Structures are given as C-alpha cells and as structure tokens.
Image (cartoon, helix red, strand yellow):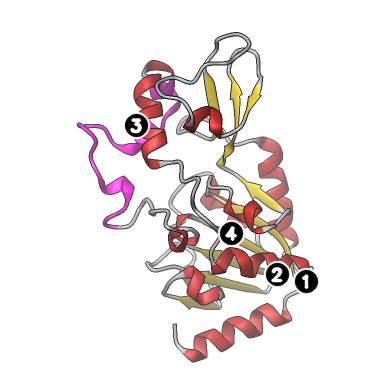
Amino acid sequence: MDAEQKAALEKIIDLSRRMVFFGGAGVSTASGIPDFRSADGLYARDFDGLTPEMILSKSFFYLHPAEFFDFYRAYMVHPAAQPNAAHRRLYQLERQDKLRGIVTQNIDGLHRQAGNRRVYEIHGTIYENACIDCGAPYPLEKITGSSGIPRCDHCGGVVKPSVVLYGEAPDKYVMMGACRELSNADTLIVAGTSLTVEPAASLIKYFTGKHLVVINREPTLADDRADLVIRGDVAEALA
C-alpha cells in the first residue's frame, strides 16, 4: 500500500458517519491465524482424501464426530491469538461512533476480544458451545480441555461448537442484523475475504451507500464496484 492509497483510505474514513466493516480470514492472519483460501491456505491441503469442506460439514460432524473434533481442535481453534492492529483500529472507530457494525465471517472472536460490541458473527464463534440434546451451554474450554468427543455433564450428549458448518444455515437474526447495518451504511470496507462463500458473500449487495473500499491480497468479486482497492495486509492498511 502506497502513501496515496493510505491517504485516500483515511479520507474516506474521516468523511464516514455510518461505516460497516465486512471481514474474512485475512483480518486475523496478523494475529497468527492461517487463512483458508490462498494458494497455501488450509483449504488447499488434502487430509487423507478429504477436503476441509468435507470435514467441516454437518453430515461429517454427525457421522464421524471423533474425527471432526480432532480436525477442529488442530486447525480451527486458536485460543492464544490476540487482536492485531486492524481489530484495535476498528474498536477505536466504534468508540468514535463512526463504525456502526462489523460483519465477520471469522469464528475466532477477536473483534469482541478487542472490545467491539456491534459484531455480527455470521459463521458463529468458537467461544459458544452447547449440548445438541439438552442445550446446556459450555465455554471453549469444554472443547480444548478434552479429547475425543466432548460430552455434556448433564445428559451425556455431544457438545457442539456454535459455528456454522457446511450444510447449515446461519442464524437468521444475525443475518437480519447484518443486512440492516449494511443497508444503512454510507461506507463499506470489505477486507481479508475472497467473497466466494455464500450466503455471506451476497450480503454486500445490501450496501447502497457512497463509498466501497476493498482491502485484500488477491482480487475479489467486489473490486469492480469499489472506489478504492488496496492490495495488501489488512492490519497494515488499518494501522
């Protein structure tokens, strides 16, 4: 990112009054969490003939729960990760009442850890878990502090992470809130996402505001619509 792009980004942020941030895995790479869809990302790997999409599906969870949790603990949970410069900047913008909402595809919880409260986690979060039989809630430690299949202390049912698996629908109230914020925004920053996963990718169609900014290392489906496209690291751009 050059100085001219940095100045253009800051000018758009300065003029904004109802900004929304739409982020993906690239927002958290500076926190040490690997991305998914880059050339060397998690989704480019093979796991004994299975793709990550297969393992992270609703059907695989119910048919092979032990294998699901082995993969989930190894690759999807990063409890030691800390918010980076992008998360911290977004918290500052929310405190200034410029940022009206964060719509995130990430399940790492780093936006809330940074202090943001207007967060729409459309794919859920690793920090919420519940028994699929009785609904008893559990913290992340129920998953990370056990091996094999985590079981409910009350009824013995399987404790499932509150993340949206392939084949599951996102929470309708979270989606409604995200759509509301996007439709009311005057500025949308799309960052760290390839915009290839549905239905999340289609959400940006609700934005009809003045400024669209894209920050991503690789081209996205929103580039043609954007006022400003920055090829680079999200944390560096927002620092």
Q: Is residue 15 or residue 152 the one in the foreground? A: 152
Q: Amino acid at mark 2?
A: Gln
Q: Amino acid at mark 1?
A: Gln
Q: Position of residue 169 (x, y in %)?
A: 56, 33
**Residue 138 versus residue 24 in the image, above or below:** above
Residue 230 appearing in the image:
yes
Where does the magenta region start and end? Answer: 39-61
**Residue 94 versus residue 67 in the image, above or below:** below
**In the figure, residue 128 lies in which quadrant?**
top right
Residue in view at x 29 percent, y 36 percent? 51
- Give the distance between the C-alpha atoms of the residues marked 3 and 1, in whole angstroms: 42 Å
If you read the primary sequence from the N terminus, does the residue marked by circle 2 or circle 4 appear first? Answer: 4
Residue 22 badge = 4
Q: Position of residue 164 (x, y in %)?
A: 53, 35
**Which residue has dot 1 on it?**
96
**Mark 3 against mark 2, which lies toward the viewer?**
2
Residue 54 badge = 3
